[in-house]
Amino acid sequence: MTAPPAARGELGDESGWNPTTFPTQNGSRGLSASASYLAMADDLQSRWAARDDRSFDPYDGLAGARVPSALTRTRAGRLAAVHLHKRLPFNARRPLGIVPTKSAYTVAHFARACLLISRLSACDSAARAAESRLWWLRHNRVGDGWSYPFDVQTRTLHYSRSTPNIVCTAFAANAFLDAAEAGRDDGLAVGTAAARFVLRELRVHRPKRAYFGYLPGDETLIHNANVLAAQLVVRAGLLADRPSMVEAGLEAVETTVGAVGDDGAIPYGEGPGLGWVDGHHTGFVVEAMADIAGQVGHRPLEPVVDATAAFYRLHLFDADGWPRPRPGVRYPVDVIAAAQGIQTFARLGGQHLATAAAVAQFAIRRLRSPSGGFHYQRQRLHVKRVPYARWADAPMSLALAFLGAALEARRHHPAMGAHA
């Protein structure tokens, strides 16, 4: 597929790019909007396939062979090591021995994008890329789950590269369930094994409620982790005809439904210091709840999806598609917030497609680099241009593929409003 030309100028503001008139190779006619987004998604995955999907990462600050051990002994030191690289507008990793790594999160997003691209465009190279990435995921599990390729320290959690987590596991398992729905290989067996791992290792029981944790043995309630797990368990249960899985997923999602504010806001988690609301984690929750409601036909969940989607659209995006990190805050403009917005609104479909397209157009104008990838963040006074697969180009590839799929579905079925 031929991707549209990269935007000109530092942030693409002066490119004159029109999202409905992408030129073809001979310049004689434009691609449809759906084909243009699919072409851009394909270009992103192809660029990183040429690098074996290996990339630096905003959170890889603990991965260096020469990171001072004094920093790694304490939470404050680990956070300092991670945030040094997250915040610098240039790449200072190599002197510390930090090298690009291959993440299940990245590979899963690109695999899912390739499956969509190959289904909608009969692109043989995308189909081969999907198979290659699924093979890698199948052979790089930690038990029946997936982990990051580096030790992690966030404001809430510290865990090692050998510890499977729900985020990597949910995204990777969904790639296999996508493959299963496309009739490919052993996708259902791998995806269902991951769902069983989630039920066995991550399920937390409390009086009158249950939910899924982020890591084995950790009982902190993080709402996006809980709902990503619930979505995986419900989807696998439906595909494998295991009603108990579906019931467990629905029980867990009710715990997060109970935390939704009257205005539709979704807190990050439950407990001291976890009550903040942000953009891309809200998107995770809205998308996963909508997916559950759509698959199960769970009508009591539909008003919650509507309320949370409305909050997400009104408080975490501007009318021009500008993604906000938090309600009332404009900077930094983060590419993963844009990508998740595109994906969530595209999958919601209907009236939300216009929002998905607006966010996509904003991201292409303001975050796309001249080389065709996407910048990590735009701050008020500078841009962070270090190329990141996991945080930027992989989620953007999948998001644009979902948008292309939604627009293609609407083109063939104009009244279609269900999510992709």
Image: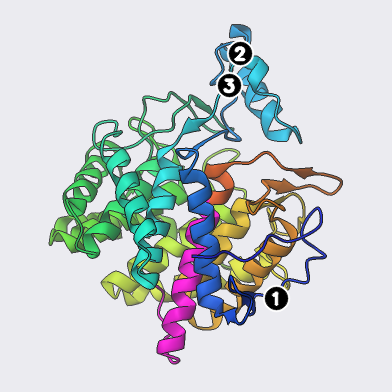
The residue pinned by badge 3 equals 98
Residue occupying the far bottom of the picture = 415
The magenta region covers: 394-420
Main SS class of the magenta portion in the image:
helix
Sequence-first tag of 2 and 1: 1
Q: Please tell me which residue lies in front, 109 or 168.
A: 109
Can you identify the residue that label 2 sits on? 67
Image: 58 above or below 73: below
Which label is found at residue 18? Answer: 1
Query: Residue 341, how many percent across, how many down?
Result: 57, 63
Residue 33 placed where, x, y %?
56, 78
Residue type at tag 1: Asn
Q: Is residue 320 visible?
A: yes
How many angstroms separate mark 2 from mark 3 (CA)?
8 Å
Q: Secondary structure at mark 3?
A: loop
Categorize mark 1 by other alpha carbons within 10 Å: few (<14), some (14-19), many (20+). few
Q: Is residue 308 rendered magenta in the image?
A: no
> Residue furthest toward the left?
241
Residue 260 shows in the view: no
Graded by Cα atoms within 10 Å as few (under 14), some (14 to 19) or many (20 or more), the crowding at tag 2 reads some
